[in-house]
Amino acid sequence: MFNERLREPERILIIDDSPSNARVVAEALRGQAEVHHASGERAALGMARSLKPDLILLDIAVPDRDGRAVYHALKAMPQLRDVPIICITGQDADDEQLQALGMDGADFLRQPLSVQETRARIQTHLTLQRKARLLERAAQDMSDMRRYFPVFIAYWNADLRNISCNDAEGCWFGLPAADMAGLHARDALGADNYRAMAEPLRQALAGSDALFESRFSRPDGEAWYGRVALISRGANVLMMSISDVTDDKRTQHALFDERERARVTLNALADAVIATDDDGRVTFLNPIAESLTGWQFDDALNQPVDKVLLLRNSQGRALPSPTHLALAERRTVGLALDCELQQRDGGLLAVVGRAAPVMDHAGRPGGAVVVFHDVSEARAMAVRMTHLAYHDALTNLPNRILLQDRLLQALQQAEQSGERLGLLMLDLDHFQLINDSMGHAVGDQLLQLVALRLQQGLRPGDTVSRQGGDEFIILMPGLGTIEQAGMLSEKLRRLVAEPFRLGESRYDLSASVGISLYPDDSRDADELYRHADAALYHAKQQGRNHCRFFSGEIEDALLTRQALERHFRMGAKQESFLVYYQPKVDVEDLSTVGVEALMRWRKEDGDILAPAEFIPLAEKTGLILPLGQLVLRQACLDGKRWHDAGCDLHVAVNVSAMQIAEAGFCEQLRATLKETGMAPDRLQLELTESVLARDVELTMAMLSELKSLGVSIAIDDFGTGYSSLSYLKSFPIDVLKIDQSFVRDMLSDTSSGAIVAAIVRMAQAMGLSLVAEGVESAEQAHALARQGVRIMQGFYYGKPMPVEEMDRRLS
Ligand code: C2E
Ligand code: CA
Ligand code: CA
């Protein structure tokens, strides 16, 4: 609305030839308006045009001028059309004369003008003028309001007849307010529009206000949407307001359509889709997601997504939902590669998928969407394929590729740990005959049975693989001994040799086995294969149904070892292991002052083996312990016997380092002495230097303990080891045995002679007895005797002999 106070002072134009009227007017309006004066027709019209006065006073009582013409000229100007004109007439003009002038809308003032009347009349016109202007503006406002605030407002009486409405132009229902007045709502609004509101109208008349939206149509048929309020105003008046919400509705419908399209699309997808809000709570689940997770949409709604989409890795560890990462980092995030979905009922599915943030209108992540699908079958298929690539289809055993892989790994490990590793090639003998005579179906079944048996015969960690045909290769890592390899391959050979049953039929198979060993005979995978193959060839040559090692030495050693063990364990001790005795002679009177017990092994074929051929083996296998005890006991028994027969001699027994190291050796010795009745001071233990060279304190303790039993101690092979004089002095030793190598060379080699001389002097200085070993000739004996050695041992005085012979010699 415009502001009254900002209004400019009103302008009055007086058109008059004489100034007297103008003076009266100026007097009448002093301070209230601007008064302008014009005389002459032309000047008057020009001024009226430029001044745009609010009111014009026109003197028409001018004798030589047509006042009417000026009046009409003023009225003809568009900008002055609504400006009131007061005509000043002659004194005697009566009303009829004025009517006859035909100036519609003009007002008249008679001359002479009175100040009061003039003022009153002018003010009335100005006030009217102002009101007219206000009305005009209000009408403009209404029309603007209708245009910019589209609300239709109407009042109805109890019969639903229109009392009034604000739609002067009939924009809403095609009827201007004036025409609508008095009409029944059906006729005022149109039958269809009325029908849409009939029920709420009835209710509103009954007193309950209504607010609702309805679809309407314009007279031209175009549809629009209105929000309708029906409010009863007093007993018989109903106010109706309708605002146009067509635009809102369209947006809503578009949104709905968009949503629906998305919903149908998501539901039709073959992938599972889960949507969350920005807090990670579930807002949507499509049917596939329902079936994969086991969660119904209604249950899942608003749950934390981690609860519905329970992801774990293949080790069973829980994985965080990718939606959190997607939201936090505002990027698409893939599910872990080995991802599994734990279903609501506990089932597991392999899934792949991605999560992406959904940005809102402000560019912030307003939520996230996870899309995933079940790849359990594909993954299972991949596992099957991998298995097939590394296994033999017929027997399901590892194939050559997998074996090679494991062999290389095992070799690497063996290299680090120093362990032994065996590669066995096992080939069924004459299997082609079965294939040819019984058919391949039988052959295949037998191969499967063989595979099963071989697997049963293996240790955990071994690998049996089929190389095609009837050949199997077995990898045995971590073998302790060669023997173990022999035993295991024998076991496999025997397993194959046991009869097979297929239906009613019995099949007797046999296998040949070739064995190669790392590091004994092969340095790498290639050699292992070649050597096992060569060994297999030899096994076949040998007449099949055999196990062969690649290395002949290993083969022999193994056989010897097996025999040694067999003999010992079979309890055939007396016949297999013998004790020979070699005399020790005092050169002064050639009397036998002692004997040394030396072990012998009589093999099944009657051959007698010297210790060099089996003692290293016995030490390796630990058999030296029972063997050593056997010799000790036998020597004590014989010594006691000779002693009882009156022979004054000592019996010397060789004791290996391993025996000494064995806890309880002393105790065992004490018990043996007691059991046999042998006098301890008649027993001498021969220890090599290597036994003494170990831990000085331990050796000291051990020697003292032995000495406390009453036995004497000799150092065997003296001069060949690393004995230092310092500890020799402190150890409780009785005898030094000069090694036979010095005796053998002393006559030809001066340094050997010098060593013998030195040993003799040292023994004399330390008060130790001396024995010279390996004396083979009189010259040697003389030379030694000259140096001061009295006790000799050697072929010259007597070879090691069976106990019966020694008995004879002593008697
Ligand atoms: P050793 O203790 O030095 O035994 C002496 C070896 O020299 C014996 O060999 C003996 O036959 C041999 N010999 C004796 N006189 C002569 C000679 O004039 N010329 C030559 N060339 N050789 C002579 P044998 O019986 O073959 O024993 C060899 C080694 O076996 C022994 O050497 C000893 O270290 C070990 N040994 C023998 N019996 C046992 C036993 O019961 N227990 C243990 N732990 N070791 C034994
Ligand atoms: Ca000896
Ligand atoms: Ca010796």
Image (cartoon, rainbow, N blue to C red):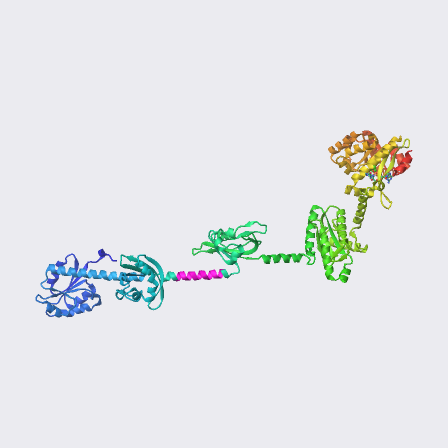
**Residue 55 sits above or below residue 706 on the image:** below
Q: Quadrant of ligand 2?
A: top right
Q: Quadrant of residue 467?
A: bottom right
Who is closer to the viewer here, 672 or 232? 232
Region rendered in magenta: 250-266
Q: Residue furthest front?
A: 206
Who is closer to the viewer here, 762 or 214? 214
Q: Quadrant of residue 191?
A: bottom left
Whether residue 332 appears in this view of the structure is no
Whether residue 347 appears in this view of the structure is yes
On the image, the x and y values in percent for residue 640 come to 85, 32
- Asked if residue 781 is among those painted magenta in the image, a careful observer would answer no
Quadrant for the C terminus, please: top right
Horizontal arrangement in the rendering, residue 692 relative to residue 138 (left or right): right
**Residue 711 sits above or below residue 123 on the image:** above
Judged by its main secondary structure, the magenta piece is helix
On the image, the x and y values in percent for residue 564 come to 81, 44
Q: Residue at x 87, y 33 (%)?
A: 641
- Asked if residue 259 is among those painted magenta in the image, a careful observer would answer yes
Horizontal arrangement in the rendering, residue 365 relative to residue 786 (left or right): left
On the image, the x and y values in percent for residue 626 come to 79, 39
Quadrant for the N terminus, please: bottom left
On the image, the x and y values in percent for residue 669 come to 79, 33
Who is closer to the viewer here, 680 or 299? 299
